[in-house]
Image (cartoon, grey):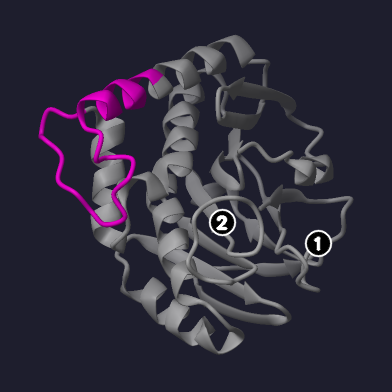
Amino acid sequence: MYQPRTYRHWIRDRDLISFSIVVKETDLCIRASTNLKRKAFKLVTKYRDILERYIERHPDFPTALKPINVNSNAPSIVKVMSASASSTGTGPMAGVAGAIAEFVGTELLPFSPEIIVENGGDIYLKSLKKRLIGIYAGKSPLTGKIGLEIDGADTPLGICTSSGTVGHSLSYGKADAVIVLSKSATLADAAATAIGNLVEQPSDITRGIEMAQRIEGLKGAVIIADSNMGLWGELKLCQISLQDQNKTE
């Protein structure tokens, strides 16, 4: 089910060109130093076709809620999704949005020194300067008031979000937002889902942080439930205004 990406109206990074790519359920907002819409469309179509063909041959892949093995000759995006699932205890599709953002963003880098690919709140970011990523946490009073400051030297970076109260993605928890940072956007996406599944009430934030610490490859995590927040890792939190933020959901 498609949901409008209303949070995209908050974007204020005027130094980059912004364009959207929509292919079936995939809806990307991309920022780059030049208009790469045609190339991006071909890449989205390419990776969707790869996944769709793989799913036709392996119908258990999209429905699995736990890690499953894939063959050594599986496509690269499938193997990365499977590895991320194994690291987080999720099904491989838990990382699909981050994977699309990551694989498309990586292939666009030769054509633009800076790339931001946002896929339903899951972000692949390569920047030459500091960027502010605003945090959208539904009805939490923290929405629109705090964000993450990302140093360009720390990119490429995946910044992915899961929510049990916002959007239509499967989550067993009720966290307003779980934001995870990793060099792999695929891993960050799967980890955000896994951590979010643990948080049914604010008192579960500690459990979520402990899980984030156990997942190899993560750089940091933010968990928000109502007005409560837990932090771990290499994070720089900041206060923001609607005038200076990029935005994650």
Amino acid type at image mark 1? Gly
Whether residue 184 is visible to the viewer of this picture, yes or no, is no
Residue ID at (71%, 78%): 226
Q: Is residue 65 magenta?
A: yes
Most distant residue in the left direction:
72
Q: Secondary structure at mark 2?
A: strand
Image quadrant holding the N terminus, namely: top right
| Res. 177 image quadrant | bottom right
Q: Are marks 1 and 2 in contact (CB under 8 Å)?
A: no
Q: Is residue 102 magenta?
A: no
Q: Residue 187: horizontal and vertical position, in percent?
A: 37, 52
- In this figure, which residue is indicated by the disc labeled 1? 144
Mark number, residue 161 = 2
Q: Main secondary structure of the magenta part?
A: loop
Q: Residue 164: horizontal and vertical position, in percent?
A: 58, 64
Question: Is residue 235 shown left or right of residue 15?
Answer: left
How many discs mark residues in the rendered view? 2
| Res. 82 image quadrant | top left
Q: Residue 201: horizontal and vertical position, in percent?
A: 58, 83
Residue ID at (21%, 32%): 58
Which sits in the foreground, 165 or 177? 165
Residue numbers of the magenta segment: 49-74
Marks 1/2: CA distance? Answer: 15 Å
